Image (cartoon, rainbow, N blue to C red):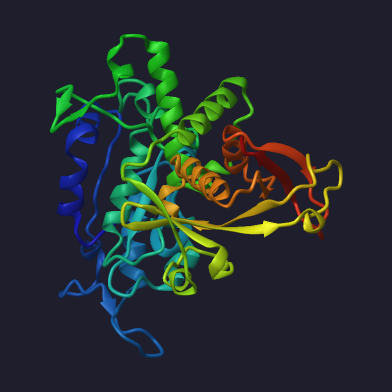
Amino acid sequence: MTLFPDTVGDVLSESILGRAQERDYIRILTHQIRDYTQNKQKQVDDYPYGGGQGAVMQADPLYQCWKHICGQHQSKPHTIYLSPCGKTFTQEDARRLAREYDHLILVCGHYEGIDQRFIDGYVDEEISLGDFVLTGGEIAAMAVADAVCRLIPGVLSHDACFEDESHWNGLLEYPQYSRPAQWHGMEVPQVLTCGDHKKVERWRRKQSLIRTRDRRPDLYAKLDLSSKEDQKLLAEIRAEELQKPLTLPVSCTPATCEDWENISWSYASPMPSHGYLIWHGDQPAACISLSPLNAEEALGIQDGKWSAQEPSLWLQFHGQDPALVHTNLMEHVLSCARDLAREAGIGWIRTAADKRKKAQLEHLKAAGFQYRGNLSRGQTREVAYELRLK
């Protein structure tokens, strides 16, 4: 139901949906709401009661159009109004609509919307594409129609055509490549040309996990990743990201309070005499501090102890550039800390790490830091690590 049936019909009669209609797998009809008015001007809108901007689509033309469509079916079709006030449409909604209903009526509003009385009396559900406003409901209706129709058996050549796509199993789809194998200096990943289908499927699963984690953490949080294979993939991803190299030279310089104030991602201000900036090229990449820590000042450990009662440097992390999270930046940070300690003639570096930050713990272990136990200060979740410099 729309004020622009030709436009909607033209779009939905092309490509896959067009061929599916020719083969009678689906049928999509567009109805001009103006044809159901009872005035010569074919007026379908009027000023809103109570005043305000714009015009509202009247209830009766909508009802007459809806009644005509319902009369063509033995059972009442499921009626959907495309509205910014509706529930956000998801792939699960597309699956539900394709599974539960043989006939759908999609109502496209326009202007300032439609008369609420039609919604209250004849609309079964309201659907929105997202938190934004369109001029009319046609684009949203075409999106819903496309998403639902392609799930009807026969519309696509095989179920795998949509089962591997984004959102079907809660994951975003893996990257796709086509010929040629090399384009503008960029090559297709070698695994995709090896001919080993098991390796290809494993690579695609891994890429989907990475893409979903990075782009849609809300979806990633809902995934069940408890299988042995997924756990192996996650371990591989963590290991690979620890080694992803930085592309520019890394350097370390003393920092000032002014330096810290100019960095949006630093979350603490150490004493300037103890603060350092790690640079990636000419851009600050991380903030740390290295403070002298005498034996009697060493923090207590609940279930362990420091290896030696000797002077040490206390290493604290004060933030890093979010764009460099999945790189080996921490390897460079710890290397700078070792160099600074050696220059100061100190034989030990000690630090605390949040036990929930698995990547940071793995970086510390990879750099040779040894676990010493849980710190005893307050309600902390911090654990103690130390490194003896040789």
Which residue in the rendered view is the most extreme toward the bottom? Answer: 51
Q: Quadrant of the C terminus?
A: top right
Residue 25 sits in which quadrant? Answer: top left
Measuring from the top left, give residue 275's x and y in whole percent.
53, 63
Q: Residue at x 29, y 65 (%)?
A: 134
| Residue at the outermost right position | 303
Q: Residue furthest front?
A: 345
Q: Nearer the viewer, residue 126 or 255?
A: 255
Relative depth, front residue between 380 and 116 = 380
Task: Give the residue displayed 33% in from the left and 51% down from the top.
Answer: 69
Query: What residue is drawn where x is 34% and y is 25%?
Result: 161
Direction from residue 26 to residue 360 in the image, left or right:
right
In this orientation, does residue 144 appear? yes
Residue 85 rendering spot, x and y as whole percentages: 45, 66
- 205 lies left or right of 157: right
The vertical placement of 284 against 329, above or below, is below
Quadrant of the image containing the N terminus: bottom left
Q: Viewer-proximal residue, 202 or 135?
A: 202
The percent coordinates of residue 157 (x first, y second) are: 30, 21
Work out whether 349 lies above or below 230. below
- How many numbered badges does the structure rendering display? 0
Q: Is residue 93 visible?
A: no
Q: Which percent across, then down, holds residue 280?
A: 36, 51
Residue 338, by quadrant, is top right
Left-right relation of 156 to 327: left
